[in-house]
Every structure is written in C-alpha cells, then in structure tokens.
Image: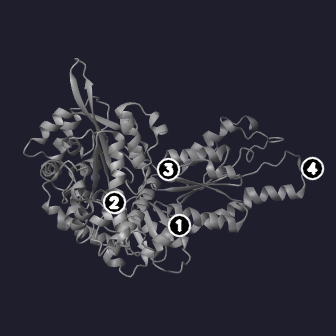
Amino acid sequence: MKSLWSDREAEEFGGDLGLRVYTSRLLGRDKSLVLHGGGNTSVKIQEKNLFGEQETILYVKGSGWDLETIEPQGFSPVLLAHVLRLAELPSLADPEMVNQLVTHMRDASAPAPSIETILHGLMPQKFVDHTHADAVLSVSNTRDGDKRIREIYGKRCVVIPYLIPGFDLAQFCAKEFRRQGSTETIGMVLLNHGIFSFGETARESYERMIELVTLAEKYLDSKRAWSVPPNRFTAGTVAANAQAGLRRKLSDTAGSPLILKTVISERTLGFARHPALARISQQGPATPDHVIRTKRTPMLGGDVAGYAEGYRRYFDEHAPRAREPKTILDPAPRVVLDPAFGLAGAGRTAKDAAIVAEIYEHTIDVILRGEALGGFQALPAKDIFDVEYWDLEQAKLKKSGKALPFAGEIALVTGAASGIGKAAVAAFLARGAAVVGLDLDARIISLYNRSDFLGMSCDVTDEAQVRSALERAVLAFGGLDMLVLNAGIFTASRRIADLPTEEWRKAMSVNLDANLLLMRTCHPFLKLAPRGGRVVVIGSKNVPAPGPGASAYSASKAALNAELAAEMCGPLFAKTTGAQVPVDGGNERVI
Ligand SMILES: [Zn+2]
C-alpha cells in the first residue's frame, strides 16, 4: 500500500483542520482501508473561545459523513476538557455519552460526533486515524490472530482484545495504552475490529497508517495469503427472471420493496462455489459495524423463509440478555450467495444495495486470506448482535422519517434522454425510485452518474436490444415495478395526402409497436413487483385534438407531464386503471 500524500494537493488545504480533511479523504479513497462511513479521524486544535480563553477542541468525524468526501463541517468540534472529564467516570451509558458530547460542542449545528470520540480524546497525539483495513482484519480474524498481530507489530502497536465500541472500550484502551505503550508506539490494533495510528502532523499520522497496514500486507504475502486466487469454475447464464423472483421474496420478507444488486464476477462466483462455503461464510462479518448493512450472515441459495426463521432464532437467543428491550429488525437477508450468480446485495435504496455488495466483496477477500493463513474466525454471534441491536441504532429506527414513496422500487422510462422522458426520470428519482432510462440517443448513458440510475442506449423497436437492456436492468436493481412508455417520434409535419408510407410505418413502429414489445418483455417482471406493476403511457394532445402541422411538442409541457407519470404510479392513483389523464392547461383547440 502506497501513501497518496501529495505536497501539491496538500497545499490547497490550509491549517490543521484543512490537512485533517485532506488526509481523511486520502484514507477514504482506498476502499481496502475504509468502506462507506467506516473509520474515523480526529485532530486536537487550540482555539480561543468567545471570552478570549484558550480551549482545546477535539475535531472528530461526525456521524453521517464519509471520509472520502468529508468537508471541514463534517467534523464535530467537541471540548476536549469535557471529553477527558467524562473518561474519568466509572461508567457511562452510550445514549448519555452521546448526549454529553453533543451538548459540549463548539457549534450547535455540527453533526453528532463519532461513537469513538472518547477514544480519540484519550490518545495523547494531535492527529488520530482509525480504519478497518482489510489486511489487518484478514490477520486478526483468524484462530491465532492475537499472536500474529503481536508478531507483526511488536512494540509499534498496542493490542486490544475485542470490546464493543463505546465508553468501556475507550477507557480500556487508555489503560492499555499506558501499560503497553512505549516511545516506539505509533498505533493500536483493536482485534476483530480495526487499527489506529497517531502522529503530531496529519501527514505523519496518515503515513503511519499506510506503514502499519503495509506490514500486515507483507506478512500475508510472506504466508502466501495475500493474492488468493479465486476458485475455478465455469460461468453459466443468469436468469433475470430468477433474480426478480428472488427480489420479490426478499421484499415480502422485509415488508417493503428492496433493491437487489447482482455482482457476477470471477471472485463472487468462485466464492459462492467454494467447497467450504457453508463454514466460512456463516461465521460473521469482517468487522462488527458491517452488520448494520449486511446482517450477520449471508443467505446461501434461495430459501428466504428458512433464512428468516434462522434470523428470528438468533434474535430470540440474544435479545433477552440486553439491558433494554429490543425491537427485531426485518428478517430478510441483505447478502445472497448463490453458485448460479455469485453475489447479490439487497437494500432499501440502490445506494444501500450497492454498499452492501461492495462491503461483501471486501469480506470475501478477508475470509479467503484468513483461510489461507490457517482459518478464518469471526467474532461470536453475541458480539455481533450487540452491535446490530446497539441502543443508538435502535433509537435511529424510531426516529427514521417516512421513506420516499418509491423507495426500493424500480421505474423504466423510454425516450428518457430528453423532454418528457428526461423529466420523468428526475420525477421518479426524486420520489426515491431507482430508474432505468432507455433512449436511442447515447447521451442517456451519462444523464446521471449515481447508483440509482442506469442509462442505456437502446432501440425500442428491436426486440433483442430491449431484452438485453431489461436483463441488465434486472441485474442492476433486481426487477421492475413501473414502466413509463414515452419514446415517440414526430416525423416532419405533413398533410395526409403527402405522407409517404415509410414515414407512417416508422412512426407506427416506434410510437405503437414498440409499446407492445416493451409491455410484453416487461410483463413477467412487472408481475413480480412487490407492490404490483404499473404502466403509464405518455400519449399526445394530438390524439383527442389533432392540430394541423402538429409541431407543438413544447418543453414546458414536458415537466408537468412527467410529474404526472410518477404520480400515476403512486398511491394517489392506486385504484385507477386504464384511465387517460390530460395534462393540457386547458384545451383550446377543441373549443
Ligand atoms: Zn471502528
């Protein structure tokens, strides 16, 4: 692993907080160090308060921020003196700890500070970096991980056995730091969790992280456990219909529609066909906080009911130990491994599903390396349960607002690169749907660069092209709930007497025949939609009131029409079937 530090880039970030932002982003850029909201960083800065008094402010990553894209306002400015006083208390419950930290911030509008804030505060160095590096987890999550980690780091790292993040962990680390630490100490490994590095400058702390993780990589390499080749296999074909059927079962079990992202690769197929899959995949995640996204274990094959039953058993076994009553989460799996397609990740939004899939791809690496090192071993289920059902995660459930109306659903829009179609894409995205946009115009591919949009160049009159676009869409999102037939062409205006047959046929083929083809191809998927499939056909004002020359396909109408297309798929029109709704601003032509 190489340091990504660049003097030229660093120059653009002034001051300690600026450089803290810069090196946090450098950590975030490498997915083998941190994934989606994982990891955290901090810096201690002396500042004058309103009364002119010097105070040390601990700027620590705020919740809801990703290291890769963090900004200065993504750091919570907590009064260090208060953090250190809290650390002296004999015990402190997590909700009160968060309350204490939030009420002792310099800026009331800052995000809530990370759960690991007290730990950052107790580390004496100015800069502290924390990641869940794949390489460190690969070594640590093995039967004799403790011994191996000590062998790799010697005096360079303090080693801490697994404890759930929070107050007790922070206190324990501070105590161990005093006991195990020496002048050579530059980091700390939390077994089965991750690694910390420290330094007096942003660069020093960051480059020590790179140095420490590289040591783990080299160790794995020396044991032939770094580049683990995928299992040999012959790839088959994946049936889109089967994926849509799987998504339906997952959604029914979750109680709301889910997006399902299928990842077919050598790595995922090889893993899903691993001879020891049942043992190595059912132990637990690579680091406990992944459980919030992935659940503790993946589902093997397609028995969703069996998985849900097992999940309820896991809840019933561990919930009674908790101090507070717990509310069971939906029992649907979030990761599916199947020899037919490899890996699929499920989530309430396309972004969530993509995050789940990406986390599990890294988990595959950690498991295979751990196996090559002598045997992957995750934490016991009770430790994972404690993180999954942690008080503050449970509190989030109660607070979480209403989901967007089309969250977890997928809309396909034809003629989506411009006009009504383009506006329909925006309207569906705004309502939380994942959107598949088809258009002859290749600009559709780059209409949006976000995980909930898939644009494909497609001739909707060509059956093979429509079929392959549908298959790609189902692999990306898991199925289809709403179809908006909008593609249309307006041939040059002519009077009937002058209309050539080819022009008439071309218009008919795009405007009419293609709709039959699309509806027929989409039907099996719409049938599997968790809330029922919906179809909206965008017609034209020229049907009820044809104007001579008919060139008025005005862009101003486009947005309004499209908003209606989305509304018609929503609860407002839930009981409306086969209706034609004019959006015409008053029909002057027929008057
Ligand atoms: Zn952590």
Choose the circle earlier in sequence order: 2 or 4.
2
| Residue 79 screen position, x and y as percent | 21, 32
Choose the circle earlier in sequence order: 3 or 1.
1
Separation of marks 2 and 4 at Cα, in angstroms: 78 Å
Choose the circle earlier in sequence order: 3 or 2.
2
| Residue 416 screen position, x and y as percent | 64, 50
The single residue placed furthest to the left in the displayed view is 90
Separation of marks 3 and 4 at Cα, in angstroms: 43 Å
| Label number found at residue 570 | 3
Choose the circle earlier in sequence order: 3 or 4.
4
- Looking at the image, residue 469 sits to the left or right of residue 233; the answer is right
Q: Quadrant of the N terminus?
A: bottom left
- Which one is closest to the eye, mark 2 or mark 4? 2
- Looking at the image, residue 18 sits to the left or right of residue 393; the answer is right
The amino acid beneath tag 2 is Leu
Element under label 3? loop
Residue drawn at point x = 20 percent, y = 60 percent: 162
The amino acid beneath tag 4 is Asp
Total tally of numbered discs in the picture = 4
Element under label 1? helix
Residue drawn at point x = 18 percent, y = 65 percent: 318
Separation of marks 3 and 2 at Cα, in angstroms: 54 Å
| Residue 457 screen position, x and y as percent | 67, 57
The single residue placed furthest to the right in the displayed view is 497
Q: Residues within 10 Å of mark 2 (few under 14, many from 20)?
A: some
Q: Residues within 10 Å of mark 4 (few under 14, many from 20)?
A: few
Choose the circle earlier in sequence order: 2 or 1.
2
Check disc 4 and report the residue beneath it.
Answer: 498
Separation of marks 1 and 4 at Cα, in angstroms: 43 Å
Check disc 1 and report the residue beneath it.
Answer: 527
Residue drawn at point x = 42 percent, y = 50 percent: 3
| Label number found at residue 215 | 2
